[in-house]
Structures are given as structure tokens and as C-alpha cells.
Image (cartoon, grey):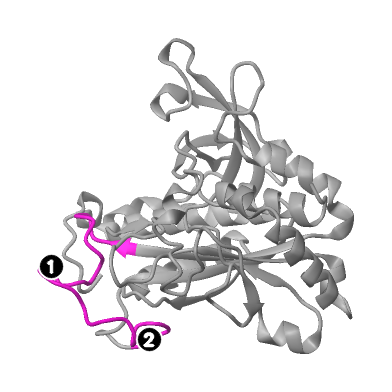
Amino acid sequence: MSGSTCMSTSCQLNKQTTLKYLNLPQPEDKVQCMYVWIDGTGEQLRAKTKTLDFVPKHPSDLPVWNFDGSSTYQAEGSNSDIYLHPVALYNDPFRGGNNKLVLCETYKFNGQPTDSNKRKTCVEVMDKAKAEKPWFGIEQEYTLLDCDKHPFGWPKNGFPGPQGPYYCGVGADKVYGRDVEEAHYRACMYAGIPICGTNAEVMPAQWEFQVGPSEGVAIGDDLWMSRFILQRVAEDFGVVVTFDPKPIPGDWNGAGAHTNFSTKAMREKGGLKEIEKAIERLSKHHDRHIQAYDPKQGKDNERRLTGFHETSSIHDFSAGVANRGASIRIPRQVAQEGMGYLEDRRPSSNCDPYSVAEVIVRTVCLAE
């Protein structure tokens, strides 16, 4: 990619040579399925591939597999087997053909979910609230770095000009890493992920893509797999993706995962009253939501939710129409039409979307 000074060993490999082998005919009775899972950090993804002799049509068609959990912060070496239970299936944009990406839940030897498996309880909660048809859309922000962890495209001995011209910008002096964004966008569409938009963000080298609307637990499946695809695409370019909510300290915007939420009643005529009821419920559980909105129970978000740089304070709950400095924003169009959705601006960019979706439904739909 032009402008990169990354010395990644991956990007130095000749990709045309790789294509020579990937273009070899694949046996019709063989399919490569890449199993993808969340490791013990609750933030990182791992993957490995299994060959099958049939084309899976549903996650239940796939066998349970296992891996060494002692190498992924999920088990002790003396009892290290962790089991992969396939839960969502996507087309593989890297291998093409009938090959698949397989999102998995992780379970311990005793059949209990691992600590980083937040999906299981999310499924249970969504089942209780399925009559309300909860929809989610998440705006995933991220930052591109060189392999030395310096922001991609930034001067090595200084800083770019102040924020202002970069958001939704155009031009080589304003936008860094569009190749990664474009490749990721198309790869997600091929995979079958409901990616619905993308844009350059306020800080240079920072981007956003939007996933949704996805109903219930599917928002977690779709967002985790879109993150995997992003990191895999960036690997080919020799660029690093970080979901750190405040990658650069100082007068630079952080990164969030703004979560748009609605129920069937909110989306219908007069739904604004339901949105206002939801905000009232959310206001009473601010601390619980902050705990659920980043993997470190608020510690990561504390660096981002300062009340500056288009954020609310982590210590206070607020709501407003078209207010990007509020905890909950009601879009102007929603207020005018009297129906639609709310935007929770508190989740951090490295949040677990299963935890975010679960706590929102518990608070708003189940009144817990």
C-alpha cells in the first residue's frame, strides 16, 4: 500500500505467488472451513482450518472441534482442551468457492462456557425478548497502525495537522488506508455480513464501518466476524488494526462502537414514546451498562468517555436529540418522525457486542 513504511514480514511476501497456488483447482468433494473464536482476552480472535468432504449449509452440519486452550488464555496446560461449537456460517472471501468461515462458541471440558463466551447468555436473553424483535446496528470504529504501532500514514517524528479535514475526507493528505477499508467492505459483502456503510473518521488513520440491522444475537455474530475479516484483510496489506478506544492520548478523538437499538414498538407509529421509556430505564442503570460496555469493566472506556471529543462523561448519564455529547442520542429524523431508534454512544470500540446487546435488552425489554 502506498505510503506505508511497515516492515511486516507478511506484506513482504509475494502475493502473486500465493495466488498461483490458490488458483489451483480445488477438489469438488473437499471444502475448507476456517473455525473462528474469541480467545481468553475477550478481545482477540483466533482461527484454524478443517477440511470437510461436504458443503455445510447450517452451523449444525459442522462437527464440534477442539484446540489447546492453554495457548489462548482459556485453560491450564494440564487440562487444556477447549471445544469449538459452530454457531454461524459465512462465505469465505479469502479462499472463495464453497469454503466457509465458521464462528464458534467456546466450551470447557465440563460442558460449561468459557469466561470469554458471552454469547450463550446473550442467546438466552434474546429468546426471552424475541416477541419485541430487538434490532441492532453497530458503528465500529478502528484505527490503522504500522507494525511499529505508529498510526498509519502519520509523520514518524511528529503529528499530522489538527482534526478537521479528515472526517469523510478525500485526498492523499487527508485519508490514510482507504485500500484496507475498501477491501474489507467488499469482503464483508461477499461473506454475507450486513455491512451497511463506512467512512473515514475524525482522527486521521481512523475509520468506521456499520453493521446491521441485525436481530438479536446475530449482531454479535456479524460484528465479530466482520472484525475477523478486517484483521485478516489488514494482514495481507501488512497493516495493524487496533480497536483501542483511545489509541492516541491528547487532542484526538477516541474510538467507539455506537450501538443503534430499536424494538418493534419503537419502529412503529408513535414509537418515540417507547424510545423515551427506554431512555428512562437506561438512565437508572448507567453503572451496569458502563461495566458491560468494555472488556475491562469501564477501565478502557474511562480513557475515552471524558466529556470531550464527542463523548459524554463516563460518570454521568445524559440524553438528547442530535447531541453527540450525550450518552444516548435520539437522531433528529427520529424526533421529527416520532418513531425509529436510539443510539447508545457509550460502548467502546473493543466492546463485546454480545454483552452490549444483552444488557440493553435486559434493561429495556425485560426491565431487569
Residue 118 located left or right of residue 148: right
Residue at the farthest top position:
78
* Residue 121 in picture, x, y percent from top left: 71, 38
Along the line of sight, which residue is nearer the eye, 182 or 54? 182
Which residue is depicted at the point 86% across and 59% down?
Answer: 132
Badge 1 crowding class, 10 Å Cα cut-off, few under 14, some 14 to 19, many 20 or more, is: few
Q: Is residue 329 visible?
A: no
Q: Residue at x 57, y 66 (%)?
A: 345
- Identify the residue shown where x is 36% and y is 57%: 241
Residue 16 within the segment the image draws in magenta: no
User: Which image quadrant for residue 58?
Assistant: top right
Q: Quadrant of residue 17?
A: bottom left
Foreground residue, 160 or 253? Answer: 253
Query: For residue 156, which numbered disc appears in the image?
Result: 1
Residue at disc 1, secondary structure: loop
Image mark for residue 232:
none
Q: Where residue 78 appears, x then y in whole percent?
A: 44, 10
- Badge 2 marks a residue whose secondary structure is loop
**Image quadrant where one finds the N terminus:** bottom left
What label does residue 169 carry, if any? 2
Residue interval drawn in magenta? 144-170
Instruction: Name the residue type under label 1.
Output: Lys
Q: Main secondary structure of the magenta part?
A: loop
Residue farthest to the left?
A: 157
Of labels 2 and 1, earlier in sequence is: 1
Q: Nearer the viewer, residue 279 or 47?
A: 279
**Is residue 167 rendered magenta in the image?**
yes
Q: Amino acid at mark 2?
A: Gly
How far from the left and from the top, in percent, is residue 99? 56, 49
Residue 126 showing in the rendered view: yes
User: Looking at the picture, does residue 194 appear above or below residue 55?
Assistant: below
